[in-house]
Image (cartoon, rainbow, N blue to C red):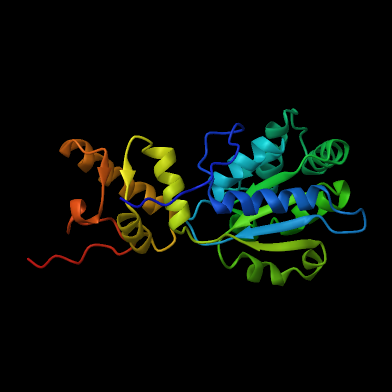
Amino acid sequence: MTVIEMKVNDMKHTNAAPLRNLGILDDIVIRAKNREEHLPGIVTFSGPSGIGKSTAAGYVAAKHQAYYLEVRSTWTKKAFLETVLRQIGIEPNKTVYQMMDQVSEELACSQHPIIIDEFDNAVDRNLVELVRDLYEQSKAPFILIGEERLPQKLQKWERFHGRMLDWAKAQPADLADAAALVRHYTPNLTISEDLLGLLVENARGSVRRIVTNLDLIYKFAKGEGLTEICLADWGNRPLHTSQPPAQRRF
């Protein structure tokens, strides 16, 4: 049975599979941290939902001692700043102005990166200028994670564009990612390359769907007493896809 070979990276910081999006995000954080003083320090990491951006962010935040938060759709400026300060471990002051100074001072002194996930919500809640102000006052690395159209959404803020170091794109899951997920989630089960190929085809780039289908395959193999499984073993059994079920007719 042919199985894709994969190289397992050093994953001692968090329990995460070594997917290529993790490597992409790690690289841009390193670039932002090590940039020359005259270069801007904001980067975006954008892509469709489900391809592993947030999982990669968790690993990278731990590795680089970065502050990490997910922006909620209901957040105000005050809620945003309070969350950042609690993430840092500082008791928030009462006013937005005071909290801005608290956050900026800490980031300026520590130069720890700050990773802001779900940044589309920050755009929708008009928090972009607040984030730009925090960057201007601290010059710390800012990594903004969002959906595929995040760079286009940010075009509305011309002054923001001048602070951009890079516009990185998350990549859809491929065969090597699927093999890494097998090693991570089902280490006692060997899955053939042809079945992995079917997984990737059905997932349409989504890590989340690959993981969901791996669970189906694992449970089937366990029920059949298999430690190795190929496409012929799986047969025509259905896999989860991106398509909703057809409407029933009564």
Residue for point 67% across, 48% down = 26
**In this view, 148 is above or below 188:** below
Q: In the displayed structure, does residue 202 sit left or right of residue 72?
A: left
- Quarter placement of the C terminus: bottom left
Which of the pair 181/41 is nearer the observer?
A: 181
Residue 164 seen in the figure: yes
| Total marks placed | 0
x and y, in percent, of residue 20 in the image: 56, 53
**In this view, 189 is above or below 5:** above
Which of the pair 86/108 is nearer the observer?
A: 108
x and y, in percent, of residue 217 in the image: 26, 46
x and y, in percent, of residue 87 in the image: 68, 34
x and y, in percent, of residue 73 in the image: 55, 52
Which of the pair 25/3 is nearer the observer?
A: 3
Residue for point 62% across, 50% down = 23
Q: In the displayed structure, does residue 20 sit left or right of residue 154?
A: left
Q: In the displayed structure, does residue 24 sit left or right of residue 17?
A: right
Residue 76 seen in the figure: no
Which of the pair 1/195 is nearer the observer?
A: 1
Q: In the displayed structure, does residue 148 sit left or right of residue 161?
A: left
Residue for point 85% across, 40% down = 101
Residue that protrudes farthest toward the left in the picture: 250
Residue that protrudes farthest toward the front in the picture: 1
**In this view, 213 is above or below 227:** below
- Which image quarter: residue 242? bottom left
- Which image quarter: residue 100? top right
